Amino acid sequence: MSVNVRVQIAVNGVKQELEVEPRLLLVHLLRDRLGLTGTHVGCDTTNCGACTVHLNGEAVKSCTVLAAQADGAQVTTIEGLAADGGLHPLQEAFWEHHGLQCGYCTPGMIMAAADLLERNPNPSEQEVRHGLEGNLCRCTGYHNIVKAVMAAAGSARAGAAAPAPAGAGEEVAR
Amino acid sequence: MIPAEFDYEAPESLEEAIRMLHENGEDAKLLAGGHSLLPLMKLRLAAPTVLIDLRRIPGLHGIQRENGSWRLGPMTRHADLQDAQELGVVARAASLIADQQVRNRGTIGGSLAHGDPASDLPTVLLATEGEVTARGTGGQRTIAAADLFQDFLTTSLAHDEVITEVRLPAMDGYGFGYEKFTRRAEDWAMVGVCALVKKADDGSCEDVRIGLTHMASTPLRASAAEEALRGQGLDAESIARAAEQAAEGTEPPGDLNATPDYKRHLARTLTGRALREAAGL
Amino acid sequence: MSTVEQPATRGDGFVGRAMKRKEDPRMITGRGNYIDDLALPGTLWAALVRSPEAHAKIVSIDKSAAEERSDVVGVFTHEDLKGDFAAPMPMVWDPPGMEVNTPEHWPLAGGEVKHVGDPVAIVIGTDRYGVVDAAEGVIVEYEPLPAVVDPEAALEDGSPLVWEQFGTNKTHEWSIAGGDVEAAFADADVVVKQRLVNHRTAGAPIETRGCIADPRGDRVTLYSATQIPHIARFVISLVTGIPEDKLRVVAPDVGGAFGSKINVFAEEVLAVVLARRLGRPVKWIESRSENMAVVHHGRDQIDYVEFAAKRDGTVTGCRVRVVADLGAYYLQLTPWIPQLGFPVATGCYRMPNIDLKFEGVFTNKFPTDAIRGAGRPEATHWIELMINKVAEELGMDPLELRRKNFIPKEEFPFTTPLEITYDSGDYHGTLDKLLQNLDLDAFRREQAELRERGVYRGVGFSTYVEVCGLAPSRAVGPQGVGIQGAGWESAMVRVSPSGTATVYTGTSPHGQGHDTGFAQIAADRLGLDPENVEVIHGDTDQGPWGWDTYGSRTLAVGGEAVARAAQKVQAKAKRICAAMLEAAPEDIELVDNKFQVRGSPDKAWTMAEIAGAAHIPPQELPADIEPGLEETSFYDPENFVFPFGAHACVVEVDADTGKVDIVRYLSVDDCGPAINPMLIDGQVHGGVAHAIGQALYEQVIYDESGQLVTGTFVDYALPTAAELPSFETDRTETPSPVNTLGVKGVGEAGTIAASPAVTAAVMDALKPLGVTWLDMPLTPMRVWQAIQEAQGGGDGPRRTEQARDLDEHAGGSAGSGPTGPEEGGAS
């Protein structure tokens, strides 16, 4: 048996201290230990992106990060993306533009898109498509996802008041 | 999906990491970004018993220019490289690795130490004639790119050696191109070509470097193609003639997506494209 | 065929609007409820020990290492569990008058394994990670047997047999014919022939399968990521002997299915049996690697097709022999699925003579079964590409050839030579609209200009008709094609005392948007806002029995049942309202969400007021009106519905590497009047993307020894956003006479339509290089090889990129440039 390790982690602004098996994947810490089941698992090879969360403000695939590696980090999940009770502009846009069907890839897709817009607030359609190359969707053919991300970028450009992120991880400077 | 059990260490100094590597023997593995190692462990294709995480060790990050070279900390992530446009072909190749989430975790040191011939940065290191500095129980040494990559997933790093620095000549005055051929955007290269071209004052080719990704069990230089172009005028014709030599002497491994013949053809075609871009044509 | 009366009951007109989905708020905030999100106290975890061999005798199973672990509760093999089963896993196609060689299929393999991934033991333990370790510790000794992977080799004498007892690998042979095919071919001016390979694909929803069986008292509840909770309860009852009433099956939010959750799988049965044995919930979540290996694959057939035509372009007949690779076992409908395309095997065309023969073959692979389209994409692929080939042979424009052979809209309902009655259609209409949107002439000019520069673009078309709305019970049932089941659907509409409504549907969604569309349908008929209509599904303890979701049946069958149940509620509401307002029921009309006396808007009640009276009857309410406001409809359609449309794909092929890029994709689909056009577009986008995946990227590959080569998402290449274009969708609306909504299904239409359009586009692009045929998937290597082969024919040098450069700089021409017999001709 391996020796457990202690992990201090702030998830959606809430500090947690847990003892974990070294092999525990961050995604399972979030889902099975903290009950944050919005982050999904769709593959075992770091391809599908359903497990995307923000680690210290940047999108990562939480199935390929050990919980132990996230010690000391700030994590934001889909549950913590928007301010209390509200919707993030990307969440609004996915709803408005039918950017989801079964909804399974959606949290990861939205978290990846948030990172994309952070890196490039004014992307072209091709930049959105390439920016989301790490997230698989089988329902939508991506058409409405791309539309939603473009729309969210547009609404941000138009100065729509984006709610401040609740997750402390969002505040970490790049 | 679930890795086999292992012990986890996150030492705070390089010395400690080297000691742990040494003491735990062949079953210990270094963990940088983990984006080559963890996927293999999740499929149980790798099962180290101890992981030694480098994340707490100071001084392993960063990009610095010094004496015509770039000094890169081994823990510098692909995302950092991608954003540092001044790195030229390094930034380009880094931007084409997998997807943004992977680039946000994967590191140059990890990529070089893993030694996957389908990876992009080993080819760039080889083409630029860069080197890595490694430290182990036997002390510190510098390994030239040409000596680093030995075989499929095999480097000349000793088991207890840690890459402490990656040094890449800045290639001032060289134009560059990196052509990566994939089935899908996020895939590994079926074949990749890194081309660097320096023009002489008369417009001819003063120097050229061509690195090939996934054309063998290690990254390769397309020496025959380089020879064919060096000293020649730089035009579409000379480039096309040189590119025809790109696969000279290669025995690429065939796989699901590409037979050896097709790979050789891709190497020629992509070399032409990368050279044209590097030469500004 | 009779036409169903379509009453004008569009209350407030929510039907037809692109309403935002009711499902979305929970899903965009991470509050969906998928199978792995369910956590029950005391849950045990399951992991399967699976065969690494494609075909082998099980010599021994050593469970001791696993059993010794403190976190393991038990390790079970077929021998341990066989007493828990009342029957093997059923296959439910039993065609009248013919034998299908049907092997026994138990949840765990006993004696022999027949494919890689065949489960030989199940480990139950307390820890999610621990059971995976324990499963690795179960030592199984195998004695390898010869495996057969190629279906045509499997039919040859001397082939290794997957099942010795049948003496052959052939599973069955099923034929259907209409007209006089022999005469059609004897009289033909031209006959074209082709062997097509329609390769094996995976459904690959992003959520894998998974389930939890929860034993409470004498009942077991199975939560499962399934498309078929009702059928699952029935099948699991059959296999386990647990009476149906003691089983409850719940489908929570399901993260996509595309057919791949249409079966009851071994793991679900094992979870139920072991939960009951151990008295604790048993949970199993499939890994992606398992999902690629042990969820049925789709397609996988070889089609030998011949078309006969007259000189004037009249297509007079076709002959098709299909060799379908069914894998090693059957799931519920494995041997039937290849035939599912037969009702539309005459396409959009008159095609008066047709002869179809289907042969199934056992191989040492996982079974095939229904994946999005199921039989119809295969048929459409051969029909559309063969129509092009006929045109090529005749020197005709393939679109003209289509128009000449289309069934004209005046001739619907149209009965085909296979005695199938197409309900309604306007095939010329969708094609005309498509061509308007495409601007074909402009494309052909651009194509010619680009070819001069060595850029190879092409356009391909697909005009399809699809059969869905599964299914008229008598057509598909035991005395029809022989399925031991039916195809009707149920709905119950309940209005609460405060005047909100709950719709219970027997269909079970996994992304389609039932909650929204069904609420729109019910709201219009109840005089309510869809906000106040809740749609409940996927729980066998709630609402009437139903036949679940597949075969694009949701709207045309399930939605129609909702409409009918809501209509019944409306009728009762009108009676109550009439009694209270002292008017005749026939004088009550529903206007602007008010039930009012015709011509007297001041005398009006809302649904809330009527519901109040229904539940707390006032004195004035006549005693012959029963209290309550709740109605159920069981709707069995009289016919299938036949959506149709025209698709076009424009590609650019990099002739130097073989890589194909989709430049434009256009569709005009007709699925009758739209309930929610936004949902229709979404279904078309996803359906087309699925077929583009098959056409260009995806393939399930087993090597010669039966090892699965494409076992993860690294090798099984689902397209990403970067590979796909934005889609230019459009619609026409031709109502179906089959149901009161006039609707047809659209979930599979895109997948059925798209693969021939993409394939034809690539062939059009490469025509100047002499490429005349390509089988999917059109991977860069395959396309490049086809170009090499075509160029190897000695038609002069190819204008490669490098050759062009050499030409330009040598100031001359090294070759004659693009050559082709009919450069610029239609695809």
Image (tube, coloured by chain):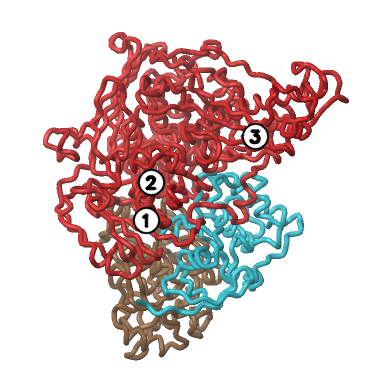
Q: Nearer the viewer, residue C131 or B91?
A: C131
Q: Residue at x 73, y 27 (%)?
A: C11
Is C330 placed left or right of C522 in the picture? left
Assign a secondary structure to mark 2. Answer: helix
Q: Callout 2: 10 Å neighbours few (<14), some, many (20+)?
A: many
Mark 2 and mark 1 in contact (Cβ < 8 Å)? yes
Chain identity for the colour cyan used in the image? A
Q: Which residue is mark 2?
A: C780
Q: Which chain is brown?
A: B
**Residue beneath the point at 52% across and 49% down:** C721
User: Circle 1 is placed at which residue position?
Assistant: B190
Direction right: furthest residue = C602
Asked if badge 1 and badge 2 are on a common chain, one would say no
What number of labels is visible?
Answer: 3
Q: Is residue C556 above or below residue A123?
A: above
> Mark 1 to mark 2: distance in Å?
10 Å
Q: Position of residue C730 (x, y in %)?
A: 60, 31
Closer-to-camera residue (A23/A137): A23
Q: Secondary structure at mark 1?
A: loop
Q: In the image, what residue type sits under mark 3? A: Arg
| Label disc, if present, on residue C494 of the rendered structure | 3
* Residue C168, horizontal then vertical, whole percent: 17, 33
Above or below: residue C724 compared with residue B131: above
Q: Specify the quadrant that holds the C terminus of chain C.
A: top left
Give percent across and percent down for residue C650.
50, 36
Q: Is residue C695 visible?
A: no
